[in-house]
Image (cartoon, grey):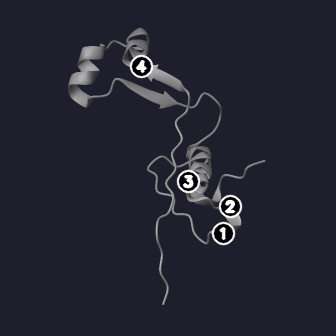
Amino acid sequence: MYSAKIIGLGKYLPKDKLTNSDLEKMVDTSDEWITTRTGIKERRILKEKKGASFLAYEASLSALKMAGLNPKDIELIIVATITPDMPFPSTVVFYKNT
């Protein structure tokens, strides 16, 4: 019988932020208007030309560290995103750490 368990979770947040105040300087909006409608005060952004696969890769390193494993110890990684690097192929096959 096969079994699976989650023994590590990972996350990665880019260091650069885009605040509602920053958006006020770019378009006709206000912090109050955005916050009232969305609850969002800031968002994290990647300034480099990298996509969701880069974020997933960095998060996977964090999960491996939490679990005390190395990449050869695991059989499967599940990647779920609504922001793929490109429409095809899927994000999970796209990122290669070089």
Residue placed farthest to the right in the image?
98
Circle 4 SS class: strand
The first of marks 2 and 4 along the sequence is: 4
Which residue lies under the disc numbered 3?
66
Q: Residue at x 50, y 63 (%)?
A: 7
Left or right of 39 on screen, residue 51? right
| Mark count | 4
- Dot label at residue 73: 1
* Residue depth check, mark 3 versus mark 4: number of the one nearer the observer: 3
Q: Nearer the viewer, mark 3 or mark 1?
A: 3
Label 3 CA crowd tier, 10 Å (few <14, some 14–19, many 20+): few
Q: Give, as a three-letter code, the residue at label 2.
A: Asn
- Percent of width and height locating residue 49: 65, 34
**Between 43 and 94, the one nearer to me in the picture:** 43
Task: Identify residue for label 4.
Answer: 19
Label 2 sits on residue: 70
- Tag 1's secondary structure? helix
Farthest residue to the left: give it: 36
Q: Where in the figure is residue 4, as x and y percent of width and height?
A: 48, 75
Q: Does the CB distance between marks 3 and 1 fall below 8 Å?
A: no
Give the alpha-carbon distance from disc 4 to disc 1, as whole Å.
40 Å
Question: Which amino acid lies under the numbered mark 4 shown in the image of this protein?
Answer: Thr
